[in-house]
Amino acid sequence: MTYPTFTKEHKSLMAKYLTKDIFDQLKDKKTQNGFTIEDVINSGVKNPDSGIGAYAGDSESYKTFALLFDPIIEEYHHFAQDDTHQSDLNPDHLNAPTSDDLDKYIVSTRIRVGRNLADFPLGPAISDEQRDAVEKIVSNALNSLDGDLSGTYYPIDGMSKKDSEQLIEDHFLFKAGDRFLETAGLNRNWPMGRGIYHNKDKTFLVWINEEDQLRIISMQKGGNIKEVFTRLTTAISKLEEKMEFSFNKHLGYITSCPTNLGTAMRASVHIKVPNLSKNMEIFKRITDKHHLQIRGIDGEHSQSKGGIYDISNKRRLGVSEVQCVQDMYDGVVELIKAEKELSI
Ligand code: ADP
Ligand code: IOM
């Protein structure tokens, strides 16, 4: 492979940090799963609008291609190479009281973590047989859950188009054919091995074999952030009894996209702030102060609709899970205050 041609449109951190010199140092390297620098950067080369544009095929990729991943991780997470990650999944440590305002402005709350199995390559490098094996291990474990978390696993293969479209529209299921995932090698042999598990009320859901092997999700209408976090942490510890997740002390939970390393947590609300949406300077000042990201309401790379935005924690590595949710909670409280002031 030769050094890729980057245009002015290539905005990703990969394009920023992959100099010709770094490329030359990495171009002949390969992980044990056969993952190369070409595989790492393909998504960002083919999709100039990528935010990051680099994917790992296995935890080894983060070492083998450290010359590229380290500066990306440092800029995105403000996390240095000798920092260590720490976890705190105790909901008692979260200071997030409920209020009428939170319920009035927040349409829904969702907190998810990504997880991958310790004994398998990550999605971009996994084989079809390994992906099917992951589906079996995870769905069997999920099918043994009880109480509030008990539910049913629905493979995408065999699901009607109508059902999958409805689940996507209701924000429960991932979209098919995402071009970022496609070029990362994450849609190979679609839809085999992919699916969604959920309980009856769709407040606890697990995606299998999307960007990560598991996306464990807790969500509900309204703004009770602590309740959503508590359900999630209970589910994580139940699943940890049944499988080993890929983790190391430096990078925390290992995920295919470097944005998710560490806690792999995205705690978000869909929040209705029509006045702030007309005052983006104030909106962005508050989200930057609390390390938050603004997305549209149909997921990553989508647009806002009707003054409703998806607001979530941006930092995920070097901060605990409690801190991720606290960032989001504190920022949301300040956004609501500003929205109310602008409406006077
Ligand atoms: P992820 O959060 O897993 O990185 P996306 O940003 O693509 O992935 O979001 C996945 C789905 O979750 C999308 O349908 C999105 O609308 C939905 N979603 C995210 N946050 C919320 C929320 N607070 N309430 C309801 N749906 C949400
Ligand atoms: N997580 C991933 N889908 N995303 C950050 C891709 C990108 O924009 O590079």
Image (tube, rainbow, N blue to C red):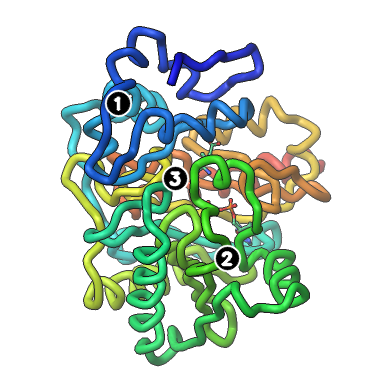
- Mark nearer the N terminus (3 vs 1): 1
Circle 3: element type: helix
Q: For mark 3, does the 10 Å Cα neighbourhood hold few (<14), some (14 to 19), or many (20 or more) residues?
A: many
Seen from the viewer's position, the closer of residues 251 and 49 is 49
Circle 1: element type: helix
Seen from the viewer's position, the closer of residues 35 and 202 is 35
Query: Quadrant location of residue 233?
Result: bottom left
- Mark nearer the N terminus (2 vs 3): 2
- Classify mark 1 as within 8 Å of ligand 2 or not, answering yes or no: no
Looking at the rendered image, the disc whose residue lies closer to the viewer, 1 or 2, is 2
Q: Is residue 320 visible?
A: yes
Q: Which residue is mark 2?
A: 191
Q: Which mark is residue 70?
A: 1
The residue under the point 49% across, 87% down is 151
Looking at the rendered image, the disc whose residue lies closer to the viewer, 3 or 1, is 1
Q: For mark 1, does the 10 Å Cα neighbourhood hold few (<14), some (14 to 19), or many (20 or more) residues?
A: some
Q: How many angstroms separate mark 3 from mark 1 (CA)?
A: 24 Å
Q: Which residue is mark 3?
A: 327
Residue ranking furthest to the front: 1
Q: Position of residue 99 (x, y in %)?
A: 58, 64
Q: Which mark is residue 98?
A: none
The residue under the point 50% across, 42% down is 184
Query: Quadrant location of residue 162?
Result: bottom right
Figure quadrant of the C terminus: top right
